[in-house]
């Protein structure tokens, strides 16, 4: 029995979270309806946030540009969003958007353009503020211009939640913000746009989704909702990630990985995050080109070991699709590492350039970066400096 066989992946579904999500192969064409709605609401200028290439190479931009032109919506494109977006680039984009007169933000890409776009949407309502003041929590936004998130990866979940992340380069800070005003009004999850993801991207973004739900199901604010979503996400990733690695053009695999990532975004919107994300942010703050998903993968076995005694029943339930022996902390941690190796992500921190002497700086950043104390505060075990240092060391 496999309920997935009963669905037509080419039939676009409408999924309502806090955002309205158009989901399925061909969903990108819904941008025409969104553009018409914007035009009816007198939203006649937008800024499009993207990276350099994917928004065009996937074919998304051709469809978006056509819809904007057909509805007489002017646009300006900021195409310099990098992985781990910075507050400097957010300020640059916000300045462009203000000068152009943008009334909404359209993001095309993975988590980085989405997060940067959410930040710009806030700054368009707060013209006297900056990316740094936003991410150092010097004000509390309650408004943003409308956001449309066109998602090109199956990992972040940012298209369905109120979170955004950016790096303040000069301080090695990578804080996270969470405000109701930055839920995208509309999101587009179209697996057709994801078949071109590289093998590494495919692995890393799906591992990001797994980490989202492991944390959301085991935080001190976890609910039955976050736990049941977590199990579903892990089951789908366990089943379909190997298929997508073997055949990148497998649209059914992309469809269910995309669905897993989308509901993982809803899952952590409810259950929130703790150790793995709080400890990864210092890694990619210190090394801005470092993959967020790879960092999460490296840390996950040590985090599982730390939280096992506090959440053994939950971990056994949600991890059962990919870890067969969850009878102890050591076996569960080892099982997660074996699964990571099975999808060709065997790295440790030393493999990516971190050394023992970095642990003190990383630990300090975990406790001093704005917002990360909030994540550590909802971990299921007491997040002392010794505990955090031990996770980093165990990941070397």
Image (spheres, rainbow, N blue to C red):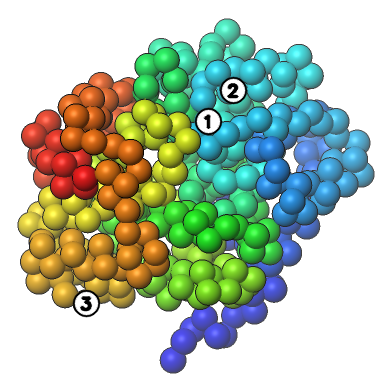
State the residue position of label 3.
Answer: 324
Residue in view at x 39 percent, y 67 percent: 343
CB of mark 1 within 8 Å of CB of mark 2?
yes
* Image quarter in which the N terminus is found: bottom left
Question: Which residue is at the front of the view, 301 or 120?
Answer: 301
Circle 1 SS class: loop
Q: Is residue 134 above or below residue 334?
A: above
Horizontal and vertical percent position of residue 7: 59, 80
Comes first in the chain, label 1 or label 3: 1
Other residues around mark 2 within 10 Å, as few (<14) / some (14–19) / many (≥20): some
CB of mark 1 within 8 Å of CB of mark 3?
no
The reply to whether residue 145 is in sight is yes
Q: CA distance from mark 1 to mark 2?
A: 7 Å
Horizontal and vertical percent position of residue 146: 65, 34
Comes first in the chain, label 3 or label 2: 2
Residue in view at x 75 percent, y 24 percent: 102
Horizontal and vertical percent position of residue 319: 26, 68
State the residue position of label 2.
Answer: 89
State the residue position of label 1.
Answer: 85
Residue in view at x 18 percent, y 61 percent: 333
């Amino acid at each position: 029995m496999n309920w997935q066989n009963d669905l037509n992946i080419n039939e676009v579904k409408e999924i309502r979270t806090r955002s309205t999500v158009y989901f399925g192969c061909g969903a990108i064409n819904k941008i025409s309806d969104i553009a018409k709605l914007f035009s009816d609401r007198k939203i006649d200028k937008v800024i499009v946030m993207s990276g350099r290439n994917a928004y065009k190479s996937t074919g998304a931009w051709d469809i978006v540009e056509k819809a904007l032109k057909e509805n007489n919506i002017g646009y300006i494109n900021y195409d310099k969003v990098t992985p781990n977006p910075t507050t400097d680039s957010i300020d640059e984009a916000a300045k462009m958007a203000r000068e152009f007169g943008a009334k909404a933000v359209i993001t095309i890409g993975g988590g980085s353009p989405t997060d940067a776009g959410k930040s710009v949407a806030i700054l368009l309502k707060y013209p006297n503020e900056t990316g740094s003041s936003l991410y150092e929590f010097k004000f509390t936004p309650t408004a943003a211009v409308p956001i449309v998130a066109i998602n090109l990866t199956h990992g972040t979940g940012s298209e369905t939640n109120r979170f955004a992340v950016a790096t303040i380069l000069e301080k090695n800070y990578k804080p996270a913000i969470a405000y109701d005003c930055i839920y995208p009004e509309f999101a587009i999850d179209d697996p057709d746009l994801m078949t071109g993801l590289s093998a590494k991207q495919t692995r890393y973004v799906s591992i990001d989704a797994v980490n989202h739900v492991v944390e959301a199901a085991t935080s001190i604010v976890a609910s039955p909702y976050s736990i049941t979503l977590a199990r579903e996400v892990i089951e789908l990733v366990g089943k379909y990630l190997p298929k997508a690695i073997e055949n990148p053009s497998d649209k059914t695999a992309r469809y269910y990985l995309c669905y897993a990532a989308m509901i993982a975004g809803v899952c952590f919107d409810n259950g929130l995050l703790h150790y793995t994300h709080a400890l990864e942010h210092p890694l990619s703050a210190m090394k801005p080109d470092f993959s967020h998903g790879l960092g999460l993968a490296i840390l996950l076995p040590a985090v599982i070991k730390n939280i096992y005694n506090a959440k053994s029943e939950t971990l056994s339930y949600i991890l059962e699709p990919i870890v067969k022996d969850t009878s102890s902390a050591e076996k569960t941690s080892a099982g997660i590492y074996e699964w990571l190796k099975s999808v060709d992500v065997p790295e440790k921190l030393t493999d990516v350039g971190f050394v023992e002497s970095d642990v003190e700086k990383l630990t300090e950043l975990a406790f001093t970066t704005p917002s990360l104390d909030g994540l550590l505060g909802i971990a299921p075990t007491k997040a002392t400096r010794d505990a955090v240092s031990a996770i980093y060391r165990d990941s070397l």
